[in-house]
Image (cartoon, helix red, strand yellow):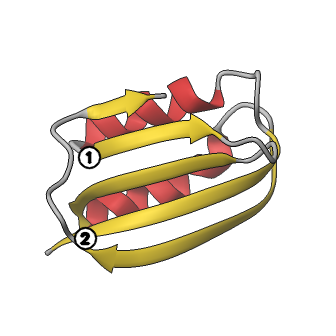
Amino acid sequence: MKHRIEVKIFGQIQGVGFRLFIARKARELGIAGFTQNMPDGSVEIVAEGEEEQLKELIKHLQFGPGKIEKATTQWQRFEEEFKGFEVK
């Protein structure tokens, strides 16, 4: 079943290639959406895809560059809004 997630990640993750790391994994998993730096120093991920692939993406976050201090995930209804995965 397809879902949408919004993930907000806090820590020392801007300026270390974290968004590119996420984009590569998302594309590998067939997930659509985007990731972007936020003004508060966090990184946001909005992604849509199969539940198992989204869970795999969430698990993969811990292996990225930088240091994650906290991450929040909100599961939402699938909207089929995106065609690919981009870095903003």
Q: Earlier in the sequence, mark 1 or mark 2?
A: 2
Q: Amino acid at mark 2?
A: His
Looking at the picture, how far across and down is residue 43, in whole percent? 65, 44
In the rendered image, the quadrant that contains the N terminus is bottom left
Q: Residues within 10 Å of mark 1 (few under 14, many from 20)?
A: many
> Which residue carries the number 1 mark?
31
Residue appearing at x 25%, y 70% in the figure: 3
Which numbered disc covers residue 66?
none
- For residue 63, what is the image quadrant? top right
Helix, strand or loop under label 2:
strand
Is 17 situated above or below 58?
above
Residue 74 sits above or below residue 30 on the image: below
What label sits on residue 3 in the rendered view? 2
Query: Is residue 45 positioned above or below 49 on the image?
Result: above
Q: Residues within 10 Å of mark 2 (few under 14, many from 20)?
A: some
In this rendering, would 84 be left or right of 46? left
When asked about the image quadrant of residue 4, the answer is: bottom left
Q: Amino acid at mark 1?
A: Ile
Name the foreground residue: 62 vs 87: 87
> What residue appears at the point 28 percent right and 66 percent down from the top-left corner?
52
- Measured from the top left, where is residue 84 in percent x and y? 22, 34
Q: Please tell me in which quadrant of the rendered image residue 15 appears.
A: top right
**Which of the two residues, 62 or 75, is positioned nearer the viewer here?**
75
| Residue 56 place in picture, x, y as percent | 40, 57
Query: Which residue is located at x 35 percent, y 60 percent?
Result: 54
* Number of numbered discs overlaid on the protein picture: 2
